[in-house]
Image: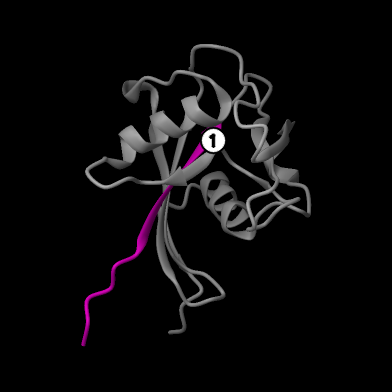
């Protein structure tokens, strides 16, 4: 039996004062283009999940987030439809520096603030499941695995 080596993903839930959260429309990436997702990305070799989400926030939406302002709100052990295992860390924050902007226009068609309880139907399912768990206060879950 071999050891599972999942991809580590990080997702950021920016919580605006009015309760809305930020989603970005994927474009020109070859995966889920036209769908909405949280500012997110993969953890690089030698990088912690906290450092990764801070880096991704700056690279994708041009904001600075302090590690002390992040809350881990959900972790999911996910298996995508292709059978690849992933572990997704969902962080939330109400504090950041700067105004979110589309800092990667070659990969993103635009940003939109949405009501998390009423996500658009074209939200990436992996992100939608994590947001739903965050709203329920569920600390961890498995998705895509048979019991």
Query: x, y percentage for residue 110?
Result: 73, 33
- Quick check: 146 above or below 76? below
Q: Which residue is tagged 1?
A: 13
Q: Is residue 52 left or right of residue 90?
A: left
Instruction: Locate residue 81: give its quadrant.
Output: bottom right
Query: Which residue is rendered at x = 32% and y = 33% of the image?
Result: 51
In front: 28, or 42?
A: 28
- Quick check: 75 above or below 95? below
Q: Is residue 81 left or right of residue 2?
A: right
Query: Which residue is rendered at x = 46% and y = 34% of the image?
Result: 56
Q: Give the magenta range.
A: 1-14
Query: x, y percentage for residue 109?
Result: 74, 37
Query: Which residue is rendered at x = 57% and y = 45% of the image?
Result: 135
Query: Which residue is rendered at x = 22% and y = 76% of the image?
Result: 3
Q: Is residue 112 left or right of residue 129?
A: right
The C terminus lies in quadrant: bottom left
């Amino acid at each position: 039996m071999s050891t599972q080596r999942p991809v580590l993903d990080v997702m950021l839930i920016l919580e605006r004062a009015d309760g809305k959260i930020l989603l970005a429309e994927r474009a020109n990436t070859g995966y889920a283009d036209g769908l909405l997702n949280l500012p997110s990305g993969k953890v690089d070799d030698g990088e912690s999940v906290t450092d990764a989400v801070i880096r991704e926030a700056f690279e994708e939406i041009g904001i600075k987030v302090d590690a002390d302002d992040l809350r881990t709100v959900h972790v999911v052990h996910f298996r995508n439809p292709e059978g690849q295992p992933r572990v997704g860390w969902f962080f939330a924050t109400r504090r950041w520096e700067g105004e979110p902007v589309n800092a990667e226009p070659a990969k993103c068609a635009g940003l939109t603030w949405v009501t998390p309880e009423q996500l658009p139907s074209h939200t990436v399912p992996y992100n939608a499941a994590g947001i739903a768990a965050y709203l329920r206060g569920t600390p961890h879950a498995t998705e895509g695995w048979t019991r």
